[in-house]
Amino acid sequence: MSDNNQISSEKYLNMDLLRFTTAGSVDDGKSTLIGRLLFDSKAIFQDQMEAIEKTSEKMGDGYVNLALLTDGLRAEREQGITIDVAYRYFATPRRKFIIADTPGHIQYTRNMVTGASTANLAIVLVDARHGVVEQTNRHAFIASLLQIKHLVLCVNKMDLVDYDQDAFNKIVEDFETFSHKLDIPDIHYIPISALKGDNVVTKSESMPWYDGSTLLYVLENVHIASDMNYVDCRFPVQRVIRPQSDDFHDFRGYAGRIEGGVFKPGDEVMALPSGFTSTIESIRTMDQQLKEAFPPMSVVMTLNDEIDISRGDMIVRTNNQPHIGQDIELMVCWLSDKPMNPRGKYAIKHTTQELRCIVKDIRYKVNINTLHRIEDDLVLGLNDIGRIAIRTTRPLYYDSYRRNRSTGSVILVDEFTNETVGAGMILT
């Protein structure tokens, strides 16, 4: 028995992890869809199910409201909407999943950016009765901007249009026209009813005209291994470890997360910004030494030479270095009620670096519906997306966001309120 448990535990630990986000307009059924996924994949505990049944009965729903599984805030349950980003975890025999259920209201677009920033895949829901709306375009554009490679357009509430194939085809046609302008290479279209369970985990008998895969099948089988950058070696140093104990008197290790490439003991590396070179002596985790390390592993690296390295520095390969500079071009999603100050000074966080910057110029804003540039209105307000130029107080070591989502992203922070006001994607 213990052997079987050990084998299953090892298999479980080695399973792929897929992070995905759900987005769509208010009341498109995002929370119900997640509840259905969890329920039909047997990922809801008995006590959770009993609590949902009791709450549904108190609210007079007349059915078991699976949306209550993710709508955790009291205000959300009272209004029947999602306000905050709700993270949920489940697993099937093929893969582990982390879900970010993001809000539909336009004023909570910033929460959608937060939930989608680490996602491999985005599920965008469309109400079969209403078709593609502005929020559909907005969320798809943000997914494209955040370099999410896989998108599933779920046409929900097909039961309310009598499972009409023409209604589904019209929505697919409308979205395809818009999606040609996006940078999303892999798009799937699935007609579903989250409430009834059609095409979520099991094939729908009500839509024999649909011969595609169920949503769970797509989630279990979508190929994400190639989404990571295993070419450009990037290791931002988060902490220098010096135990100074009798057992580890001379130990000096550099802790952080691998953000790109593959590092191996013996590799020649360079420390930025100093430019000094050395070779990797060892790569360690808590309980073992590794023969190689790759994203997104968190490790401690030791070098064969004593180099002055501190938090915010970056270890790279000598023949593959990032861009280094202070004048940076960004696509930014503005997250604050207070508009961007065109010559404003902000704190900036990039990998493990913390510094300051000034906004040199606001180049243009983006029209979410047409993706055209707006150059006659350069006020970046809440939820606006635009291109800006900044200058930092000291050089950044960065890649374009398209090449590396970790080393190509920054956040802007108001120095006085400590509020995160902008999420930026670096352009080169």
Image (spheres, helix red, strand yellow):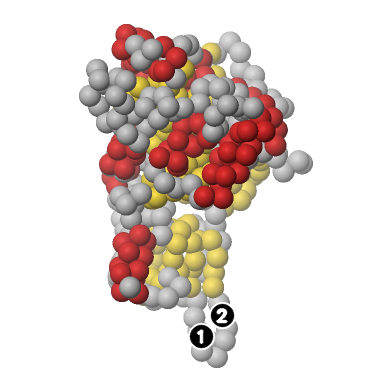
Q: Are marks 1 and 2 in contact (CB under 8 Å)?
A: yes
Kind of residue at disc 1: Phe
Residue at coordinates 44% horizontally, 14% vertically from top-left?
A: 160
The percent coordinates of residue 137 (x first, y second) are 46, 19
Q: Which mark is drawn over residue 248?
A: 1
User: Within 10 Å of the Cα at label 2, are there few (<14), some (14-19), or many (20+) other Cα atoms?
Assistant: few
Can you say whether 98 is above or below 197 in the image?
A: below
Label 1 element class: loop
Label 2 element class: loop
Can you say whether 315 is above or below 407 in the image?
A: below
Taking depth in this image into account, of 331 and 227 the one nearest to the observer is 227
- Res 3 visible: yes
Horizontal relation, residue 417 to residue 231: left or right: right
Horizontal relation, residue 157 to residue 374: left or right: left
Q: How far apart are labels 1 and 2 at the CA level?
A: 6 Å
The percent coordinates of residue 363 (x first, y second) are 54, 22
The percent coordinates of residue 132 (x first, y second) are 44, 14
Taking depth in this image into account, of 115 and 4 the one nearest to the observer is 4
Could you say which quadrant of the image residue 302 lies in? bottom left
Which residue is denoted by mark 2 in the rendering? 243
Residue at coordinates 51% horizontally, 89% vertically from top-left?
A: 247
> Quick one: quadrant of the C terminus?
top left
